[in-house]
Amino acid sequence: MKQKTFRIILAILITGISHINAQENKTKDIIDPCLSAKSNDYMDRQQEALLREVAEVMDANPPKYPAARIRQTALYLYDAVMHDKYVAFRKPVQDFFHMRIEKAITDIENTRVDEGAKIWKLYNMGFVIKTNSVTIVFDLVRAASADSKDFELSTDIIKRFAEQCDVLFVSHKHDDHQDKTVAQIFIDAGKPVVAPDQFWKEDPIYSKITHLKREANKVQELKIKNGKMNLNVVIYPGHQMSGTDVNVPLVLTPEGINVAHLGDQINEGAFMIDYDWIDKVSNNFHVDIMFPTNWTNELTRIAKGFDPEMTILGHEDELGHKVYDRDPFWGDTVFSEPSLKEFLSSGYPYLMMIWGESYHYIPKKK
Ligand SMILES: [Zn+2]
């Protein structure tokens, strides 16, 4: 009898403990509330396996135009992973992101560019361009827009970018493009941050930002390397529809390689006025590389205006967006216009890259 009572008490205790464990598991492990802890664990393992496969395909088939056919399959697989609503909360995906960016900055630190320009793709519209004499970065962010603390890049890694880059260009006010913490790190490192004057106005950082004139075709000199070098830059006065100013810098590197970053430039309604300059960029400058978003409208018309040697698309699978709006590599034409699909068959050379990938651009002999 005594033994039986003991067993009952033991059973109650064990059930209680396992119940507590189950509760803990619930709060600790369940990322997607529609799934059980076991199914969530499965999703973690699946996303890890698929990303590992994508990275292996990409590493074996680096970006070039035209791309190896298998890259398309890998990009579509990557789209599938990135359209898991909770992907930025999954530890293996966070690790993958951090590892890819860590690999990129280590490569930037150890690369000397003797010819042309080397380009690294970071998060969203973040790109580093390194020539023999300058290193510039566009729209570098920690990826706070994904709203997952553990997904964000550390300030330590951003400091390494600030160490390597001579200037940070910020296209516009949205948080998948601007990051005040990143801007402050660049300013603390003595590196200029060039941005439109629409944001951070109430913050002490505002007075430290370089607000170049937004004027089509006007070459302005930007002091870099502690004033030892002048970098020639044009800031085209772009917009993201109404209300948002987008700086579209065309950077004229000392090596004669000219790169244009379009931020979230998109023309609509009254802002068709932007075509006044978009249609004529190539009448005034030779453009080597253009970096537009993959979802902008009339991409082929923009390409005709810039007439770039190479287009490197960006903004795919931005995790701060709702699932239907994480514009995929496969080119959804229901939410976005068929602009991307048209552009891809227009004959303009282009590249699609994932986090941390690089491309060495060698200009054609003139
Ligand atoms: Zn954006």
Image (tube, helix red, strand yellow):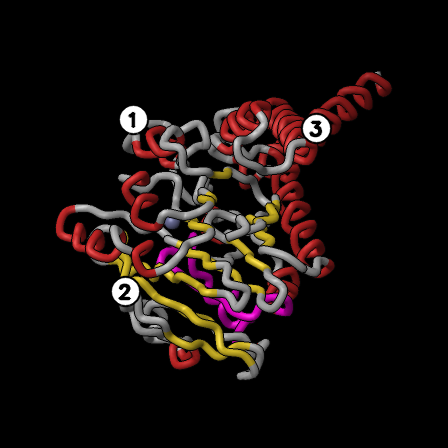
What is the quadrant of residue 131 in the picture?
bottom right
Q: Magenta residues, as a range? A: 163-187
Q: Is residue 335 left or right of residue 42?
A: left
Task: Work out how far the residue at label 3 is from the one at label 2, CA to CA, in angstroms.
Answer: 67 Å
Q: Earlier in the sequence, mark 3 or mark 1?
A: 3
Question: Callout 3: helix, strand or loop?
Answer: helix
Which residue occupies 59% across, 38% down? 63
Residue at image x 59%, y 60%? Answer: 130
Q: Which residue is mark 3?
A: 18
Q: Secondary structure at mark 2?
A: loop
Rendered image: mark on residue 126:
none
Amino acid tagged 1: Val
Q: Are marks 3 and 2 in contact (CB under 8 Å)?
A: no
Is residue 155 visible to us here? no
Residue 38 seen in the figure: yes
Q: Amino acid at mark 3?
A: Ser
Q: Residue at x 70, y 54 (%)?
A: 107
Q: Give the labeled residue for mark 1.
A: 334
Q: CA distance from mark 3 to mark 1?
A: 48 Å
Q: Is residue 161 left or right of residue 18?
A: left
> Against 21, is 273 above or below?
below
Verify CB contact (< 8 Å) between mark 3 and mark 1: no
Residue 8 vs residue 63, the one in the foreground: 63
- The type of residue carrying mark 2 is Ala
Q: Is residue 53 magenta?
A: no
The quadrant the N terminus occupies is top right
Looking at marks 2 and 1 on the same chain, the residue that comes earlier in the sequence is marked by: 2
Q: Residue at x 66, y 29 (%)?
A: 57
Q: Nearer the viewer, residue 30 or 266?
A: 266
Residue 115 percent coordinates (x, y): 63, 57
Which circle, 2 or 1, is nearer the viewer? Answer: 2
Of marks 3 and 2, which one's residue comes earlier in the chain? Answer: 3
